Every structure is written in structure tokens, then in C-alpha cells.
Image (tube, grey):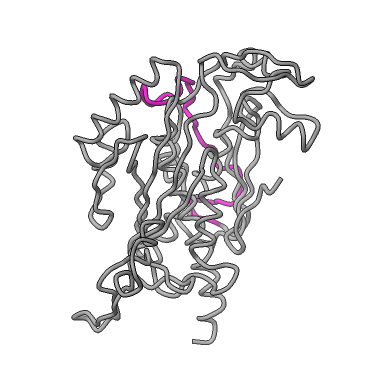
Amino acid sequence: MGNSFGHLFRITTFGESHGGGVGVVIDGCPPQIDLNEGDIQADLDRRRPGQSRMTTPRKETDTCEILSGVFQGKTLGTPITILVRNKDTRPQDYGEMAEVYRPSHADATYDAKYGIRNWQGGGRSSARETIGRVAAGAIAKKILGQVAGVEIIGYVRQIKDVEAAIDPNHVTLDQVEANMIRCPDPTTAEKMIALVDDIRRQANSVGGIVECVARNVPKGLGEPVFDKLEADLAKAVMSLPASKGFEIGSGFAGTQLTGLEHNDEFYSDDRGQIRTVTNRSGGVQGGISNGENIVIRVAFKPTATIGSAQRTVNKEGEATILAAKGRHDPCVLPRAVPMVEAMVALVLCDHLLRNHAQCHLLR
């Protein structure tokens, strides 16, 4: 099922949404990194359900337990296992979905591929699987920050047609966390909240765009052919539930420019460092980080499971009507922010270790 991600910093997530729990095994974490549950819990709290009326009302504390790989507050260099137990499970809410396929969900494709699925809340296809990613991403963030001073901040850039004008070079975590929608522009955030409230009352859902910036990324991360840094970032965030599009730097808007307009000219700063005047490349050139801020955007579709009645079929192909029960996000964007941050951190941490192993061994 492709449950593992990464090369030297490698993770494997496990668990289903209404099973005993979910979590992650992290292999390749360097030894002697200070680590406790609190380092991980902060990001899990940003991802967890029930934070506000913008998210699913499922009540989970998402309290993490470190089961292995840490001793006396330091990583051992051995596999780290993190478990989050499911508490507020209601499998009875999903009984009808054992036989009826939810439109635009993974029900029909899982049956087509495996011939069996856990229909309780989506099972493995549920966004609850991302708990393991966010937990591992918190560790990756700590390594990146400690070793290289890297800072990763995600935020909601757009919901439906309501878009904020945000400078990724100066946005702060405090600005992002100042409101329930996680948009650092307060005026736009109010408009977004009003939009989601209206959609929620209609038993419907809405999508949008998460933007993420990684600052102080060292030069030289990324492999220049199949493992280009932007290619690995794209795979990482496109593996998230409900993700439908990826951009880096100028993205699709760059197609409207000429080469002369688009190229990032070089200069030497007052410290003698080679920099670029503009950053339309989004911090990556030739598949390798150039030291500028890495800026990506991820498009998320409206939540597939909604409370409004929709036409569908059952497993026998017979037409029926489904109005989904259960608890679902009217908009995934606020909770997607820490998920995107986690995947960016996992890619950068993996490439940091790979770059050190290949290029610094004999220096």
C-alpha cells in the first residue's frame, strides 16, 4: 500500500480511523536528539479534530505515546514508535457505507483493488492516518531547526474564491494561529470563516489552497534527476488526503511570463553569499535548493463526505441515495496546514541526511 516514505529518514504509518489507534515508526533518526512527547504533541494538537466549528466535531485528544527509540529524553538512533489511541470511535455511524459507495471517496476504488476494506470512517483512507505523518514531521522539524535553523510555516492562502495576499517571507506562526481558519491575514480570515460557516449550515463542504514556506534551507539539498527536491515535495504533499494540485515558486502563473521576466538574476550580498534578486524558482533550481526560501502551494478539494443527499450506487451497482452520517470537516484547510508542514519537513530532513552522507563525508 506504499505505507513508507523517505530514504535515510524513513517513516511507516499504521492504523485505521476507527481501529485501536494510529501511529508511525521512524527509522533513521539521528541519535542524541532531545525528544519527548511534548515536542510532538504541539503539532498533533494543531491537527486534531474538534478544535473549532471549522473542523469535524469528533472529540479526540490525540495524545501521543513514544513506545521505543527514546531513552532518558534522547533519541537512541533506533526505530522510534509513536502511538495515538483512538477514543471517540463511532463505527455504527458508517454501517450504511459498508454497502453504499460515497461519491468521490475511496470506497469503490479500495473494493476494486483489494476486494475488502474497513468501511468504518474510511479506514486507512481517512485523514486520521496523517497523525503518524504529523508526529514524524515534528521530529523532522526539530532536527532541521537544531542542525540548520530551518523554519517551516504553513497557512491557508485561499478558500474557494476568497484569497489572502500574504508575503511568505515575513509570515509568523503567531499570525497563523491567531484565528481558527489559520489564515495570517485577519480581514481575509473573517471572510473565510463566514464562507465556511455558510457551507457548513448547508451540509456541504469547500476546498482551497495551503501555502507553505521553508526558510533558512541549506544550499545543495535535492538530487538532480529523479529525486529533484521539488519532485519529492510534490509527491509528499500530493500523498495527503484530498490534495489535488501542487505549485512551487511562480507555479502555473509563471507560464504567463517570458524567460527574461521569469529568470532569477544572481547577485552577491554584503556577506559575499550568492543570492537571487527574485525567487520565482521557489528556492529550488535544477532540482537542488539554492538557499532562498522554498515556497509551495497545495490545492485541496472540498471534503468528499458531506451530509447532503447524493446519487450513488451500492456494491451491486444498484442506484441509491446517500446522505452521509458521521462527523466530517466542512473544510479540510485549517487541519491540513500542519500536515503540509510535516510533509515538507520530512522531505527536507531526508535530503539533509542524504546530502551530508554523499557530499560531506570526505570534506
Point out the residue furthest to the bottom here. 363
Q: Nearer the viewer, residue 143 or 253?
A: 253
Residue 300 seen in the figure: yes
- What residue appears at the point 57 percent right and 67 percent down from the top-left corner? 227
* Residue 267 against residue 202 in the figure, above or below: below
Please give left or right for residue 106 compared with residue 219 in the image: right
Please give left or right for residue 90 compared with residue 162 in the image: right
- What residue appears at the point 44 percent right and 59 percent down from the top-left corner? 143
* Residue 141 against residue 284 in the figure, above or below: above
Q: Does residue 90 show up magenta in the picture? A: no
Please give left or right for residue 268 compared with residue 141 in the image: left
Q: Does residue 68 show up magenta in the picture? A: yes
Residue 145 seen in the figure: no
Q: Position of residue 265 (x, y in %)?
A: 29, 77
Q: Quadrant of the N terminus?
A: top right
Q: Position of residue 154 (x, y in %)?
A: 36, 47
Please give left or right for residue 19 compared with residue 283 in the image: right
* Residue 3 against residue 251 in the figure, above or below: above
Q: Position of residue 69 (x, y in %)?
A: 59, 51
Q: Which residues are magenta?
A: 50-75
- What residue appears at the point 61 percent right and 30 percent down from the top-left corner? 105
* Residue 305 against residue 363 in the figure, above or below: above
Magenta stretch: dominant secondary structure: loop
Q: Nearer the viewer, residue 99 or 139?
A: 99
Q: Position of residue 338 (x, y in %)?
A: 42, 43
- What residue appears at the point 29 percent right and 80 percent down from the top-left corner? 266
